[in-house]
Each structure stands twice: as structure tokens, then as C-alpha cells.
Image (cartoon, rainbow, N blue to C red):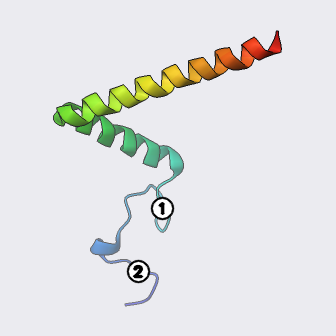
Amino acid sequence: MSTTETTPSQAVKSPLPGTAPGRRRKKAEGRKKRVLKLHSNKEFATQYFEAKSKRSIEKKAAFRKKKSKKK
């Protein structure tokens, strides 16, 4: 067997042989994985959305603080 041949266990799921999945594909796979985890694990979902809300509130407060200093 030459070094260019791949066995089934070494095969990569990508459109072109010998290339790794791209950024778009990795992001899409990550989104699917996250959605599945959010639906299956309710504890994780509550923590996830609480943290997301907290970050949003902190961003808004920082923006208002920055704008108030400009006046």
C-alpha cells in the first residue's frame, strides 16, 4: 500500500480528498451539536441562556457608560 492511499478508517468526510473540513462546515456542525445539547439537557440550556442574557446586559451597560462620558 502506498502512502497516498487511504484506508476507510483514515477517510475524512470532506468534498475533496485529503483536505480537512473548512471553517463553514465546522461552524455548522457546532451549531447542530449545540442545538441538540440545548434540547436534550435542560440544565445546560438554562445556564446557557442565563449567561447569554448576562453578557448582553453587561454590553449594554458598558455602551451607555461610554456614551455618557462623551457628553
Task: Identify the element where label 2 is drawn.
Answer: loop
Task: Identify the element where label 1 is drawn.
Answer: loop
Residue type at numbered disc 2: Glu
Q: Residue furthest right?
A: 71
Name the residue located 48 percent from the left edge and 60 percent from the top edge.
16
Q: Residue furthest bottom?
A: 1
Label 1, on which residue?
20
Name the residue located 35 percent from the left edge and 69 percent from the top edge.
11
Assign the C terminus to one quadrant of the image.
Answer: top right
Q: Position of residue 58 (x, y in %)?
A: 53, 24
Q: Is residue 40 toward the left or the right of residue 34 in the image?
A: left
Q: Is residue 5 toward the left or the right of residue 32 in the image?
A: right
Q: Is 13 located above or below residue 37 in the figure?
A: below
Q: Earlier in the sequence, mark 1 or mark 2?
A: 2
Q: Position of residue 21 (x, y in %)?
A: 46, 56
- Given residues 41 and 7, the one toward you in this image is 41
Assess whether mark 2 and mark 1 are in contact (beta carbons under 8 angstroms).
no
Q: Is residue 59 toward the left or the right of residue 28 in the image?
A: right
Numbered badge on residue 5 = 2
Q: Is 21 located above or below residue 1 in the figure?
A: above
- Given residues 10 and 64, the one toward you in this image is 64
Q: Position of residue 19 (x, y in %)?
A: 50, 64
Name the residue located 45 percent from the left edge and 55 percent from the top edge.
15
| Residue 64, picture quadrant | top right
- Given residues 39 and 32, the one toward you in this image is 39
Q: Is 49 located above or below residue 13 in the figure?
A: above
Residue type at numbered disc 1: Ala
- Given residues 62 and 49, the one toward you in this image is 62
Name the residue located 81 percent from the left edge and 14 percent from the top edge.
70
